Image: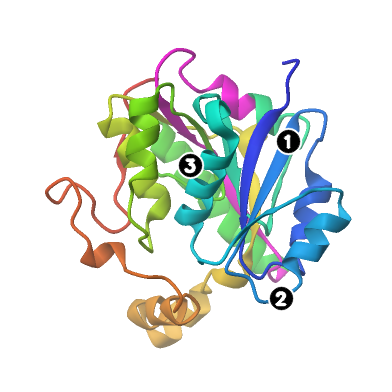
Amino acid sequence: MSEQILCIIPALNEANSIGRTLASLDKDLVEPLVVVNGSSDATEPVVRSYGLTPLVLPEAGKLPAIQEGLRYIGRRALDPILLTDADSVPRYPHLWPNVMVAALDPEGASVVAGRSGIIDAHPLVTFVRNFRLRQVAHETASTDEMMPVGYNMAIRLSDEKVLESVLALPHVWPGEDRLLAETIVNAGGNGRQLASKESTVLASARYHTSLLYRVLHGRQSAVDLAEEGYKTRRASSAEFSYWGGVLEPYATVRKVVT
């Protein structure tokens, strides 16, 4: 591809990690657009130190940040767009952008979820969890479902009607990535799960409750711990009914292309 692919990166208090993310991207292929959303640390000056001008949004939340980015880029919002987080790095920076975009429908609206992994954890935990994440990606890609991953997605909204549907979405958590994917699919778009290693993005393990914590304290305690870290979020998707109940927490999305 001759033109850079735009990549929207929400960044909430990511001063310690956004530099690694920006340094990991292949600037010949990717044009990063960082949305500093609700940050109270030095995220904004760190982004500027990389020669970028971030969008600054007072409101926290990944979905509002993505929506702000889509409004800012105008007509480019209908082109293929990458989505990742400010604490994530593509495993293969020189392959990831084109692999993700090539999996999108070249004509209509579509969404692609890439493979996920973790970093910043104990080596044994990293190995076990990444093995399991790879296994889940392959299992999911072989079925008619997909599991959107917010820090590793590509979208093509294709027309203004689909774009308006995305811009009208409420601020929910958890599950904003699934809500975004559901919106595109329900607007007539396609959804697809990738399992290739070239589509892998590695995210910091600091927001992922450990398996040991879940065993010792129970899954609900782990969920409560995650909620504690996101008190600035407005509403939980578990409390929000969309499309007459189509959206469920951590729901999967129908895959309509192979």
Q: In which quarter of the image is residue 45?
A: bottom right
User: CB under 8 Å between callouts 2 and 3?
Assistant: no
Distance from the alpha carbon under mark 2 to that under mark 1: 24 Å
Is 189 in front, or is 137?
Answer: 189
Could you tell me the amino acid type at mark 1?
Glu
Residue that label 1 marks:
31
- Per the image, label 1 sits on a secondary structure element best described as strand
Q: At 78% across and 31% down in the image, what residue appears?
A: 94
Q: At 45% across and 53% down in the image, what residue appears?
A: 63
- Per the image, label 2 sits on a secondary structure element best described as loop
What x and y, as percent, mark residue 256? Answer: 31, 24
- Per the image, label 3 sits on a secondary structure element best described as helix
Residue that label 2 marks:
41
Vertical position of residue 110 compared to residue 206: above or below: above
Q: In which quarter of the image is residue 170?
A: bottom left
Q: Is residue 148 magenta?
A: no
Vertical position of residue 151 compared to residue 225: above or below: above
Q: Which of marks 2 and 3 is nearer the N terminus?
A: 2
Residue that label 3 marks:
137
Is 120 in front, or is 79?
Answer: 79
Could you tell me the amino acid type at mark 2?
Asp
Distance from the alpha carbon under mark 2 to that under mark 3: 34 Å
Could you tell me the amino acid type at mark 3?
Ala
Is 238 in front, or is 134?
Answer: 238
Q: At 43% across and 44% down in the image, what residue appears?
A: 148
Please report the bounds of the magenta region as a residue range: 99-122
Which is closer to the viewer, label 2 or label 3? 2
Which is closer to the viewer, label 1 or label 3? 1
Distance from the alpha carbon under mark 1 to that under mark 3: 27 Å
Vertical position of residue 172 compared to residue 242: above or below: below
